[in-house]
Image (cartoon, helix red, strand yellow):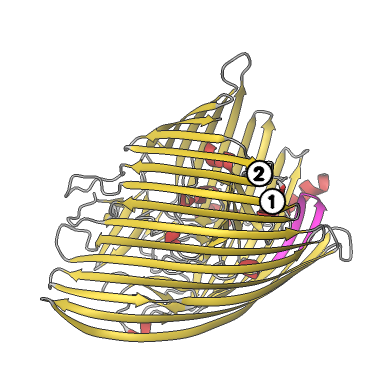
Amino acid sequence: MKKNCYLLLLCISLVNTNTILAEDTTIPRDSIKMSYTADEVVIQAFKKNDNISVQPVSATLITDQTIKDRNISNIKEVSAYVPNLFIPDYGSKMTSPAYIRGVGSRINAPSVGLYVDGIPYFDRSTFDFSLNDIDRIEVLRGPQGTLYGRNTMGGIINVFTKSPFKYKETNLSLSASSYDNYKTEASHYGNINNVLGYSLSGNVSHAGGYFRNRFTGKRADPVDAAAGRIRLSWKIQPQLYIHLTSAYEYSDQGGYPYGIYHAENNSVDDVNYNMPSFYRRNVSTTGVNVAYTTDNIQLSSQTSFQYFDGRQGIDQDFSTTDLYYVDFGQRQRMVSQELNFKSRGSSKYQWQFGAFGFYQDFSTDNDIDNRGTAVHTLQDINSPTRGAAVYHQSTFNDILTDGLSLILGARYDWEEARMHTVVHSLKADTKTETMNIRRQDHFSEFTPKASLQYRFTNDEIVYFSVAKGYKAGGFNTTVERDEDRSFKPEQSWNYEIGTKASCLDKLIYTEISLFYIDWKDQQISQSQPSGKGFLLRNAGKSVSKGLEVTLHINPMENLSVQLSYGYTHAKFKRYTVNDTVSYANNRLPMVPSNTFSVTADYTIKLKDSFLDKIVLNGQYVGLGKLYWNEDNKAMQPYYGTFNGKVSFVAKKISFDLWAKNIGCKDYISYYFTSMGKTFAQAGRPFTFGANVNLKF
């Protein structure tokens, strides 16, 4: 045991403490789940053989209990508890960019992958969904291209819903909070003779909005939403499972709470625009997983379908003057198929092979109303993409000595992107075609990965890994110059060393990792030359380096403390904008230098009482410093917020009182420039509420 504590101290000593403190200065560890039902293993082990706590990868597991304790309602709120994961909460559900270790994208295809029960979510506009009926969330940091492929250059977020073979209950939850927020959730899980499992879940919510539009006198950002999910699990034979998951979500949001930004005091004016703004979205997702398992092998098939349509109306000048209004629509139809063939058991050699294919039909229509000139610009863009991949991974255990493993993986991806753009100008009922362009391009890449791992015990390891990251190029859907129509792929080499271990008889569990990313042709979001909208361009070369530390401490039986910290130093090494402007050595935008969280849970057990226990939960979450654009002219300094919750728990009922942003901390959640002006969205204010949870 002593040698493992020495190992932890050695890894900690690798950190340059002075550098960390100079940047401003952490995020919690959740309880690791050590066992799974047979039904869960089929989904959990579709590509992975082991629990994430013993894999050579930086990972965070958030359980269903943690989701309840932290009052987490969507993926954006998850980012507060994962080191170096940043999903800014601004705008609408359409704006859900995810960044891990500085790798991410504000627009177009994401650089962090999202899977729900094995179903890939290709577009970031589908990322923000309700977390009702969720069993756990796994966040894997660093490129996962070998097993997951496209859009996983930064990492993977795996979401798993509750299994009807594990749960057999009915749940009802009612919640209300300040700012006229209400939510009802219901779910039921059951099975017939342990052969056919079924679950039904749904939720309805209303958010009154946090920011008032000075012009209309109404709140600018209300949200009405409803969602439902059905899951069927059929154990045809002891070795053969079929799982069907189908989900639907509808949301209707108000406009965008952006106001004029003042850099001198990092403040935002009230929202103040005259045109109605909104975002409405429908998302339908269905997946079928078939798995045949023996003692030695597992053959799995994952078939996935996703449809979504969204429509946005936005007062693009964000003022009371009629200058510029945009009506923008999106539609996606996606189908994917994956086959995976892998070994099982604890042999010294483990392997897996896989093949993946997809087709994504994505189209947009854009009505740009230049109200000052009475001219409409009408854009219709269809951009279908198809791709295929094959991959393999081999694991050699106990090489040279017991506990030493070598993992080698490789993937080959091929992708074809097409785009057909038709633009018309409409004035005084006269419609004139101004553009009709078809473009097509192909991308392919070989992405290898290698890891060396030494296992001291079943849950204590040290590892080193190197992997190539890749994100395909593509086309900008809205451009003003011909040279901006396409952007190149971006590539990276990623190096990581880390350890996962426990000491003092498992009173302390920790994960520590150091990483270095060297990549070229990074896809950066920039404003259009006119300031109206955004596009992607390639930067020359960039580098990101940092560390992640997670601690889980149980100093006494009823007290648990989780602490997590992420540090990222990401900058451009070469980025020439034009002959006179260079952003070399500037920090990458939208990348917090520090992410920090510490959470404490204290349980008071009761006897001879209607209540079983009272649980006290307190959290501190910090983030910053953060630059908003590549010119580094505007930034958000480090800030922290306090959250708290008290739960009164009985066998079949619980009652919660909670609060977020205790102390009313002011901060900026988003910043951008448009038409020569700077705008921002303020962070959410202090909120408080109550939940009632019933279980039958």
Q: Disc 2 on helix, strand or loop?
A: loop
Labels 2 and 1 touching (C-beta < 8 A):
yes
Q: Nearer the viewer, mark 2 or mark 1?
A: 1
- Left or right: where 407 falls relative to 306: right
- Left or right: where 9 falls relative to 415: right
Mark 2 vs mark 1, CA separation in Å: 10 Å
**Which quadrant of the rendered structure holds the C terminus?**
top right
User: Per the image, is 453 magenta?
Assistant: yes
Residue on which disc 2 sits? 165
Q: Disc 1 on helix, strand or loop?
A: strand
Instruction: Tell me if mark 1 has few (under 14), some (14-19) or many (20+) residues whose alpha carbon lies within 10 angstroms of its own.
Output: some
Give amino acid for label 1. Answer: Lys
160 over 365 or under it: above or below: above
Q: Which residues are magenta?
A: 452-465
Q: Residue furthest right?
A: 401
Nearest the camera: 552 or 233?
Answer: 233
Residue 639 in view (yes/no): yes
